[in-house]
Amino acid sequence: MSRKNVPNAARRAACEAAGAAIGKTVRVQCASCAFVGEVDWRPDYAYWPMVSGLEFDHIVPLAAGGPNVADNLQLLCRPCNRSKGAKTHATHQDDQA
């Protein structure tokens, strides 16, 4: 399966769900561990929030039929995202226990 980009509207909605807003920088914890990154949504670049230290991850992977929408996104640090791969969030959490 080829890699698909997360739609901009879904990225913005996922950042808003994490507490980000235009003109505001928020610290956001990885959905899997204690790492904390930032979402910086600059007013002069309102179209695209800047995410530092975190990556967008599909809770139910696209490869498993998950949709490419905001409700299926979470923010993970790079190591957690890489270790999760194409697993669902629940399966990955079970593996970590």
Image (tube, rainbow, N blue to C red):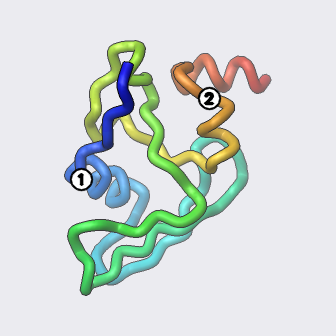
Q: Residue at x 66, y 25 (%)?
A: 93
Front residue of this view, candidates 57 and 22? 57
What amino acid type is highlighted by mark number 2? Lys
The picture places residue 31, in percent across and down from the top left corner, at 58, 44
Return the mark for residue 72.
none
The picture places residue 85, in percent across and down from the top left corner, at 58, 27
Neighbourhood count class around disc 1 (C-alpha, 10 Å): few under 14, some 14–19, many 20 upward: some
Front residue of this view, candidates 1 and 27? 1
User: Which residue does the numbered mark 2 point to in the structure image?
Assistant: 84
The N terminus, quarter of image: top left
What amino acid type is highlighted by mark number 1? Asn
Q: Could you say whether the residue bearing mark 2 is in a helix, strand or loop?
A: helix
The picture places residue 7, in percent across and down from the top left corner, at 24, 45
Q: Residue at x 26, y 47 (%)?
A: 10
Give the alpha-carbon distance from disc 2 to disc 1, as whole Å: 23 Å
Lower position in the chain sequence, tag 2 or tag 1: 1
**Where 45 falls versus 12 (above or below)?**
below
- Of all residues, the one furthest to the right in this rendering is 97
Q: Residue at x 43, y 23 (%)?
A: 61
Q: Quadrant of residue 92?
A: top right
Front residue of this view, candidates 94 and 67? 67
Q: Are marks 2 and 1 in contact (CB under 8 Å)?
A: no
User: Which residue does the numbered mark 1 point to in the structure image?
Assistant: 8
The C terminus, quarter of image: top right
Q: Residue at x 54, y 66 (%)?
A: 52
The picture places residue 86, in percent across and down from the top left corner, at 53, 21
Give the total number of marks visible in the rendering: 2
